[in-house]
Amino acid sequence: MSSHYTRVLQTEGVRCRNEDGGRHLLYHSQTDQLHMVDGIGKAIYDLCVDDSIDDVVHHGGKLLAESNGADERQARTEVLTFLCELQRRSLVEFL
């Protein structure tokens, strides 16, 4: 990821619907694509409200580490990877 990106924002037109089993369906109306995330993925997605990428990675890493007992440093790496995947799928924008 380029170092000039500092903020992350949910892409306009993405809607969320709760599904069975604690999963969440993200629908992107502009691409007409569906994306399934688990509860932690949804919680991380919810942090993407024009906040700094560093803050989302920090808070998301804490959530992930608390939910599965993982090392917080490794969890932050996983959150950053997840954010990059959301961005690749046009669900969030890096600004």
Image (cartoon, rainbow, N blue to C red):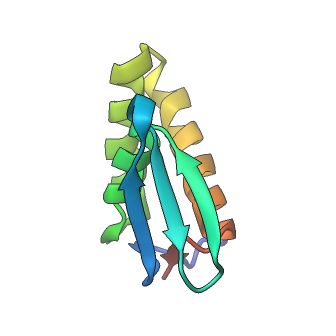
Instruction: Name the residue rendered at 33%, 21% in the picture.
Output: 66
Q: Is residue 22 left or right of residue 5?
A: left
- Residue sticking out furthest to the top: 69
Specify whether residue 19 is in view.
yes
**Residue sticking out furthest to the front:** 20
Task: Classify 15 as above or below 36.
Answer: below
Image coordinates for residue 81, horizontal then vertical, percent: 63, 48
Residue 43 lies, in percent from the top left, at: 34, 46
Question: Which image quadrant is residue 16 in?
Answer: bottom left
Q: Residue at x 46, y 79 (%)?
A: 11
| Residue 79 higher or lower than 51, as above or below | above
Q: From the viewer's perspective, is residue 68 above or below residue 49?
A: above
Q: How many marks?
A: 0
Q: Position of residue 30 (x, y in %)?
A: 59, 86
x%, y% of residue 37?
52, 45
Say if 82 sits above or below 29 in the image.
above
> Who is closer to the viewer here, 27 or 43?
27
Can residue 1 be seen in this snapshot?
no
The residue drawn where x is 48% and y is 38% is 38
Residue closer to the observer: 32 or 58: 32
Q: In which quadrant will I find the N terminus? A: bottom right
